[in-house]
Each structure stands twice: as C-alpha cells, then as structure tokens.
Image (cartoon, helix red, strand yellow):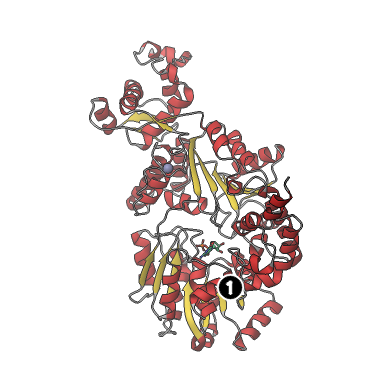
C-alpha cells in the first residue's frame, strides 16, 4: 500500500498536512528524520503512515504512559494493529500484547523508555523493526521544558538496530533543543522537517488581569458546553476559581498535585470522556491529555515562558477547528515566578539571565499591542508575513495601540512619576499618584504637590496600571524585589524621557465586551444555523457510543468530522465514507449508527423540495 492509500483507507483523509508525506517517505526510504510540528500539526500520522503502509513494525517511544492507552485505542480505531508495553499494564494486557507481538501481527508498538531500556525487549524486536520513532523528543534535552534522563540512554538501545531509520518528533525546536535531539539520539544526517510554528485556528487574546474569576467566567460563558482548560499558578487559585465557576453553573473539576491521586484521576477521566467540560489546573495537568476538541485554554496567571505558553495553549483546537486562548497578564505574576525560581537559593548567573529573558519575553508578548500570532511565530524563529491575522485581540480591534505621540506622552508622565518617587514606592502607590488619589502617606511625603499628581486621572485606573506593566516589560521601568516590590526607572526610561527611544502602549479597551460579541462559540461558526442542532445530536450519539465502548469520544470521530457530517448530511454509507475523518475501519464500526441519525432528518435537498 502507498502512503496515499493508507491515508485514505485508515484515516479517511485525502490530503496530507504539511511535512507528513515527507516524514513518512523518509522512513520508507530508510532515512533518519527530525520532525518539528506544532501541537495538533499531525505528528502521529508521520510514524503511523509507515506502519500502515509498510511491512515491518514501528516502535514508538513515548514518555506519556497516561496517554498510551488512548493512543493505542485511536490507532486501533483507524484499523491498525497497535499495542503498548508499559509499567501500568495488568498481566492479562501484557500477555496479550506479547502474544500478538510474537505472532508478528503488531504494526505499531508504543513503549515507555524505561520499558525499552529494561531486559531483552529491544533485542527481540530488532529483526522486525521498520522504524523507531521518538515522540516528545525534546525530553532528551536539558534545554527543553521536560527533561527525562532515560531519554539520554535511548541511544544505547538504538545502536542495537543500526539499519533501522529513526524519526524524532517534537513541537519545540529552538536551535539548542534541535542540536541536542540530533546528537543525543544519534540521528544520522537526518531530513530536517521543520514546520511553521503558527496555529492559524487558535484565536489569541491577552488582557490585563483585573478580576480573575469574572474574566475567566466571561470566556467560559462564550463556550457553554464545550471543553476548556483553565491554568492557574497556585493550588489556592485553582480551588478558588474552580469553586467560583461551579457556583456559576459551569461543569468543572479542579486538578493539582496536592489533590489525592483518586481525585486527580477522576478529573482527568471526566474531562477526556466529556463528562466534565472544564478543568481548572496548575500546569501539572495536560501532559496526559489527548482530547482534541478543547475549545479554549485560559491562563488565569501569566505563564513562565513563551515555550510554556505555546505548549499549554497548544492543547486547544488540536482538531483544527477554531479555538480560543486567553492570557490574563499581571506583572505581579512575573515577580512570583522569579521568587519561586530562587526559592532554593541564588541561581547560577547563566540560569539567572535565562530566567530574566524568559520573563521579559512572555511579558512583552502579553502586553504589546502587536499581533500575537506574529509575536509567537517570530519567537520560534519563523517569519510571519500576513499584516493582520484576523485571529488575535489586536488584529480583531479589541486591543488598540496608542498613536506614537500619545504613547510617548503617557509613558513620560508615568516615568517622571517613578523618577520623582526615587524608586522607593510600589506600582500601586505610583499609580495612585498619577490618578490623583492621595492618602495619608502620600500627603506626608508631599507627593500630592508634585506636578505629576493626578496627571493621568482621565485615563483611568485600568489603563494606568496596564501601562506601568507595559513599561516594565519594555524595560523602561523595573520592579525591584525587596520586602515590597518597588518601581524604579531604568536607564532606558531616563533616555525615553529625553526623547531617545521608542515606546508602544496598548489602550485598555473594554476588551471583554468586544470579545463576547466576536468570539461566540467559534467552533460552531463553521456550521450554518440549522446544522447546529444536528451537530449536537451527532455529538450526543458519539458520547453514548464512546461510553459503551469505553473509549474517549474524540477517538470515535473528531468534532471536525461531525461538523462536516452535519453540513453534508450524507444519506448512504458511500457518501459517509467521503467525509473527512471516516476511514474504512470507522465506517464499518460506526457508519450505520451515524447514518441512522443523519437519516432521521430530511436531507437539505429534500427539505428544499418540501418547502412550499
Ligand atoms: P500532534 O501529535 O502533532 O499534536 P496529532 O497527531 O494528535 O497532532 O494530530 C492532531 C489531529 O489532526 C488529529 O486529530 C489527527 O487525526 C488530525 N490529522 C492529522 N493528519 C491529518 C490530515 N492529513 N488531515 C486531516 N486531519 C489530520
Ligand atoms: Zn493578529
């Protein structure tokens, strides 16, 4: 079978995603490859296609045991003979997997690195291998965000299969990580298949945080009945937000490392099986989540770095349908990250510099009135050509940049207030000064008689606070950590006051309102009005079938496939097979049930005829 035939037969897709064909072909040509595609880019097909098309066994090393069973279920739904070997299998499951493996029936075998490194497994597999794939390959690198020591020992094993091509896959590829992967996994003149990091189906929004719960709730309300993840920094925040959402009738669960394992497992399972819509979590949640129809990810606190943000927000919209990523920014979060990082004592100078750079970059991303797709793309070393993405708060006109002269004027007012207070007061104090809100202390300090007192009264508190944050991330101001964080002007700031340099400031628009109007149920926007009801009925059917089969709903069909069914309303099995995402195996297993549901409604052609 060719890889084109495999794509249609097993997955019901007619077109490759970028680089999928090249990656699969490299394996068939016995070449090593490094595949870098963003989350949702379709990495799994890169190694599954050779398994479907080829003769031999494809071995997949994956660090995510929690995910393996779902991956195996999904591959089996596509009609592949897939199995997994890891420490969580019961004896029966393990015995069956070995039996199929020894009978030569297995096409795709997932293993954890620990399992592969132990015992004789590698030697036993060697003669039959057509490809070894290493998923989440950045785990091999100290530079990545999730270093796994066992990944460093994989090369010992791979040396035992010299003639077998290797494929490393990851979503992160800074040059350091890339170099590490190639070196540590011993890739031999690999084909470098580096995809574009942009995720056009994600709508990015970044707002200054004002009222955390209200702002999170606002997003959740736009996506009623849809899957979402809310990330918060501390366990306390997680519990407070989860309780707040629940009180407002949102179906949600809390997840953090301090909860009993049983409760964590329930939250995760509830989310994957769509019994729960929203999980509020610390970043501990997500690595083991493969739910493809997550329609939104909210960061209720500022993430640690651009890499973290891309990884975490990337869990939205893996099915390719529109999804929303909202970041609520506060400069205080950056200070908290700093404090946490230094908790164990002073950092090495190199780590210290890296930390500061990471915090500055994520801060700049969050507050600059510049297209967020462009900022993210450029951060990951690619260029972004479009003038407007049409999918971020800036390009949608929800966040407006101030005109250059206006921005400079506002910046100078704030900077001179910081200058006059000599770095001895915090952000709140300086903001109050600019807003003309004098308290006892300010009067005592004589600051109510400064020329800058009340000079930004008209702009309002939200704007002034956000502008201070914006000036901090652009290095015109710095927050100095002490008993209390103090706001101080920098060299760059003093230069700016003397008209040397350039500043950009975003206006704090009534953004939440704009977003509510424009972002309504983005995933359903692709459907015509009448199809929405049918889409929901197909979703309900899917949920029922998935529960009966004991597999996650997205493994039956993706939302994108249901949406296409609802729009096209196929009336025969042949027509159903033509829908993207319906391959031979799924047609056989689920075709009749879905057809019945589709036939229960008149087709669009029939209803047109029936109309008077
Ligand atoms: P990644 O591992 O890169 O995050 P996945 O392999 O999970 O991405 O794929 C994301 C989604 O894209 C899956 O639901 C998959 O079925 C879908 N997909 C992959 N390849 C194609 C394709 N060629 N056409 C349409 N959908 C695809
Ligand atoms: Zn944009």
Q: Residue at x 76, y 65 (%)?
A: 548
- Residue 60 visible? The answer is no
Residue 438 position, x and y percent, is 46, 14
Q: Is residue 224 left or right of residue 183?
A: right
Q: Which residue is mark 1?
A: 10
Residue 388: percent from left, percent from top: 40, 42
The number of numbered discs placed on residues in the rendered structure image is: 1
Q: Residue at x 55, y 48 (%)?
A: 323
Residue lying at 34% horizontally and 61% vertically, measured from the top left: 176
Q: Residues within 10 Å of mark 1 (few under 14, many from 20)?
A: many
Vertical placement of residue 24 versus 553, above or below: below
Q: Is mark 1 within 8 Å of ligand 1?
A: no
Q: Secondary structure at mark 1?
A: helix
Q: If the image is split into quadrants, where does the C terminus sit?
A: top right
Instruction: State which quadrant residue 251 falls in.
Output: top right
Residue 333 x/y as whole percent: 48, 39
| Up-down relation of residue 326 to residue 44 (above or below) | above
Q: Is residue 588 above or below residue 174?
A: below
Q: Nearer the viewer, residue 117 or 386?
A: 386
> Residue 516: image x %, image y %?
57, 35
Quick one: which residue is furthest to the top in this view?
449
Up the image or down, 113 lies above or below 510; here it is below
Nearer to me, 513 or 130: 513
- The quarter of the displayed image where residue 407 is located: top left
Instruction: Farthest residue to the front: give it.
Output: 612
* Quarter of the image where ligand 2 sits: top left
Report the front residue among 350 and 145.
145
Query: Is residue 596 shown to the viewer in this render?
Result: yes
């Amino acid at each position: 079978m060719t890889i084109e035939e495999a794509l249609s037969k097993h997955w019901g897709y007619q077109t490759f995603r970028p680089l999928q064909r090249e990656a699969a072909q490299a394996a068939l040509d016995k070449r090593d490859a490094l595949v870098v595609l963003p989350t949702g880019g379709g990495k799994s097909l890169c190694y599954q296609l050779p398994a479907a098309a080829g003769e031999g066994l494809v071995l997949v090393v994956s660090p995510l045991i929690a995910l393996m069973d779902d991956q195996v279920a999904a591959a089996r739904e596509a009609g592949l003979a897939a199995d997994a070997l890891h420490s969580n299998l019961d004896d029966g499951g393990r015995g069956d997997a070995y039996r199929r493996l020894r009978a030569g029936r297995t096409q795709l075998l997932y293993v954890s690195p620990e399992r592969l490194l132990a015992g004789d497994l590698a030697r036993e597999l060697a003669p039959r291998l057509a490809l070894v794939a290493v998923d989440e390959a950045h785990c091999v690198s100290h530079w990545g965000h999730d270093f796994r020591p066992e990944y460093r020992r994989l090369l010992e094993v791979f040396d035992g299969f010299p003639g077998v091509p290797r494929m490393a896959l990851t979503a992160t590829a800074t040059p350091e990580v890339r170099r590490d992967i190639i070196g540590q996994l011993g890739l031999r003149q690999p084909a470098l298949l580096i995809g574009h990091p942009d995720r056009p189906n994600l709508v990015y929004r970044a707002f200054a945080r004002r009222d955390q719960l209200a702002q999170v709730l606002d997003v959740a309300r736009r996506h009623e009945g849809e899957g979402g993840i809310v990330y918060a920094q501390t366990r306390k925040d997680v519990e407070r937000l989860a309780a707040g959402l629940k009180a407002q009738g949102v179906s949600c669960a809390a997840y953090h490392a301090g909860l009993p394992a049983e409760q964590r497992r329930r939250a995760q399972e509830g989310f994957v099986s769509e019994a729960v819509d929203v999980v509020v979590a610390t970043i501990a949640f997500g690595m083991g989540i493969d739910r493809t129809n997550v329609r939104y990810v909210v960061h209720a606190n500022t993430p640690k770095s651009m890499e973290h943000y891309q990884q975490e927000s990337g869990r939205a919209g893996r099915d390719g349908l529109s999804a929303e990523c909202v970041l609520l920014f506060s400069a205080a979060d950056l200070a908290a990250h700093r404090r946490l990082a230094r908790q164990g004592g002073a950092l090495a100078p190199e780590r210290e510099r890296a930390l500061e750079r990471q915090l500055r970059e994520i801060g700049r991303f969050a507050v600059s009135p510049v297209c967020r797709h462009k900022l993210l793309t450029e951060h990951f070393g690619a260029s972004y050509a479009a003038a407007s993405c049409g999918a971020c708060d800036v390009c949608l006109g929800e966040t407006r940049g101030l005109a250059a002269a206006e921005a400079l004027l506002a910046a100078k007012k704030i900077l001179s207030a910081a200058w006059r207070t000599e770095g001895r007061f915090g952000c709140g104090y300086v903001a109050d000064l600019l807003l003309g809100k004098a308290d006892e202390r300010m009067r005592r300090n004589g600051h109510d008689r400064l020329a800058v007192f009340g000079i930004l009264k008209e702009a309002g508190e939200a704007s002034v606070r956000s502008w201070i944050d914006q000036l901090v991330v652009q290095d015109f101001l710095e927050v100095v950590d002490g008993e209390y964080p103090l706001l101080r002007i920098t060299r760059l700031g003093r230069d700016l006051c003397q008209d040397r340099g350039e500043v950009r400031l975003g206006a704090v628009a009534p953004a939440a309102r704009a977003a509510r109007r424009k972002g309504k149920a983005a995933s359903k926007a692709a459907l015509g009005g009448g199809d929405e009801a049918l889409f929901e009925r197909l979703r309900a059917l899917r949920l029922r079938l998935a529960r009966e089969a004991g597999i996650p709903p997205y493994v039956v069909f993706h939302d994108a496939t249901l949406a296409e069914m609802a729009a096209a309303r196929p009336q025969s099995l042949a027509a159903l097979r033509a829908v993207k995402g319906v391959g031979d195996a799924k047609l056989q297993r689920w075709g009749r049930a879905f057809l019945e549901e589709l036939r229960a409604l008149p087709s669009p052609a029939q209803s047109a005829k029936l109309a008077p």
